[in-house]
Structures are given as C-alpha cells and as structure tokens.
Amino acid sequence: MSHTLGIAIESLVAILLMLTIGYCMLLNTRLKRLKADEHSLKATIAELITATEIAERAIGGLKFTVRDVNEHLGHQLTSAAQMSQQLKNQLAEADGVIRRLSKIAVAARPAAPAAEAAAPRASAAKAVAAAAQAFSDRRRPAGLAA
C-alpha cells in the first residue's frame, strides 16, 4: 500500500504541476497582451503630449494675434473717430460756403427788369456790397480767406 499511496501522491503532484504549467502559460499570454497594451498606451501618451505641445504653441500664437489685432483695431478706431470729426468740420464749412454762395447768387441776380433799367447803378452797387459781405463772411477762424 505504500507504493499505491506514493503513486497516488506522485500522480496528484503531477496533475497539480500540469495545472500550474497550464495556468503559467495562461498568465504568460495575458502578460504578453499587457506588455503590448503598455507599448500602445505609451505611444498614445507620447502622441497626446506632442498634440498638447502643438496646441499650447497655437494658443500662444493666437494670443499674440489677438493682442496685435486689438492694438491695430484700437488704432483704426481712433483714426476713424478723427476722420469723422474732420468730415464733420468740413461739412460744416461746406454748409457755410453754400450759404455764402447762395447770398452771392441772390445778390448778383437782377432784381427786376423794369427796376434794372431805372436804376442800373444802384443794383450793381448792391451786388458789389453783397459780394463783399459774402467774401468777408468766408473768412476762416485763422484769419485767412477761403
């Protein structure tokens, strides 16, 4: 019986050894897959790091562009405001010139054909006086005639 018990124990050890070898093979396969996944994960992480660096550079460039556009736009707004004020002043001056020209035109027009024949000298004198008045009205604030 001692041989039978020895063989049974040896057989049990052999079966357990074969189960252990099978389990080790299964673990080896899983470890290989885990290593492969680790390498692909490292590659993915490296790609993400590269993409992050590129995005950071792009954001820096965008910030610089926004600052540049902001300054340029502010400059253009200031220029536009100045141009608007200049145009407003020129329109006011043009309005004054139109008024003076209309005064000159009214003064230069003959009053009436019958009155012109009767007093041609008085009408001409009035026209000259109105023209002189219009010319003096044309004087600019700096003292120069327009």
Image (tube, rainbow, N blue to C red):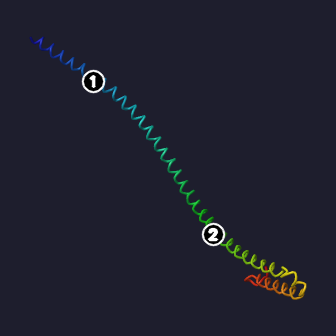
Figure check: 27 above or below 146: above
Say which quadrant the N terminus sits in: top left
Residue in view at x 43 percent, y 41 percent: 45
Element under disc 2: helix
Work out whether mark 2 precedes mark 1 in sequence or the reverse, and give the earlier one.
Answer: 1
Q: Decide if residue 32 is on the left or right side of residue 133.
A: left
The residue that label 1 is drawn on is: 23
Q: Nearer the viewer, mark 2 or mark 1?
A: 2
Front one among 64 and 96: 96
**Quadrant of residue 116 in the image?**
bottom right
Q: Decide if residue 92 is on the left or right side of residue 135.
A: left
Front one among 130 and 95: 130
**Quadrant of residue 139 in the image?**
bottom right
The residue that label 2 is drawn on is: 81
Front one among 90 and 59: 90
Residue in view at x 80 percent, y 83 percent: 135
Residue in view at x 30 percent, y 24 percent: 26
Which mark is on residue 129? none
The CA span between labels 2 and 1 is 84 Å
What percent of the width, then of the height, locates residue 62? 54, 54
Q: Decide if residue 146 is on the left or right side of residue 122.
A: left
Tell me if mark 1 has few (under 14), some (14-19) or many (20+) residues whose alpha carbon lies within 10 angstroms of its own: few
Figure check: 6 above or below 128: above
